[in-house]
Image (cartoon, rainbow, N blue to C red):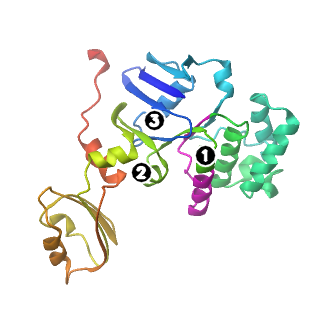
Amino acid sequence: MLLVTHLRKAFDTVLAVDDVSFSVQRGEIFGLLGPNGAGKTTTIRVILKILEPDAGETTYDGRKFSDRTRDILGYMPEERGLYKKSKVIDAILYFAELRGMARGQAKAEAYRWLKRFALLEHAERKVEELSKGNQQKVQFITAVLHGPQLLVLDEPFSGLDPVNQILFKDILLELKREGKAIIFSTHQMEQAEKLSDSLCLINKGRVVLGGSVRDVKKRYGTNSLHLEFEGDGSFLNTLPGVSRSLIYPNSAELELTRDAKTQPILSELIGRLEVRKFELVEPSLQSIFIQVVAGVPAPRQLEAL
């Protein structure tokens, strides 16, 4: 479906996208991951021809970007792209008609989606009167209404409460089953781990990790200990055999050295914590992300290119 090859984009002395390549297939959810400022949004804008690349190429089913390509794309930017003074239904219909939808068809689809998102009662309200989460829902509707083959979502879970995050997740999985190709950009590793089939981790404009989620996690082994407990776990990073740690108030993920044994660790915990869960698991994307990003050198200076 989508093939991105050696993209490069610079702004003055900032190299925002540095030799980025990946591919996305139909029926696949692809996570474009990275911290804030990593180059994710710039990469998306280059793919969608909002920005022209300095080098590299993007093709859609083997063809370069064209007006026909624009019609099969759906895009939800991270920043709000809605006319705040417009009524919700008018804003949705405006974007649908830009995509070539007949007004009658667009209106029927708009009300179907508004019902799905429990927004029917807000159809005649102005966009600016909605909560941030409801504006996010409306923006999603404008991106998906015309039935795009490739859906690109920049930080789609921003501003959503847990219930609506689940609703978004269910809809994305439905679209995947329909054969849509979906790219979603996020710095939330937990969402990416649950949803993505494949991923590309960008940091400082460069690809630092890529492939299927399963292969990425296999690459980093299974020597990770997940704990849930009651008590003060601040000492966990000092335990023998622990090389890295992510410690939260009532849980922790400990990356162990190759020769580490779990029994001595468990013995250290007894009497110090009330342990509810002690499980050797694959490392999370969060821990892999921290491990990989920590080793990425500074970006190249443009003057040296």
Comes first in the chain, label 3 or label 1: 3
- Residue corresponding to mark 3: 40
Q: Amino acid at mark 3?
A: Lys
Q: Is residue 87 visible?
A: no
Q: Is residue 208 left or right of residue 193?
A: left
Comes first in the chain, label 1 or label 2: 1
Residue 220 placement (x, y as % from top left): 26, 48
> Crowdedness of circle 3 by 10 Å Cα count: few (<14), some, many (20+)?
many
Query: Is residue 248 or residue 283 the one in the foreground?
Result: 283
Q: What range is drawn magenta here?
A: 150-172
Residue at the image position 31 percent from the left and 53 percent from the top = 287
From the image, state whether disc 1 or disc 2 is nearer to you. 1
Residue 9 placement (x, y as % from top left): 43, 22
- Residue corresponding to mark 2: 189
The CA distance from mark 1 to mark 2 is 23 Å
Secondary structure under badge 3?
A: helix
Q: Amino acid at mark 1?
A: Arg
Q: Amino acid at mark 2?
A: Met
- Seen as rendered, the residue at the extreme right is 104
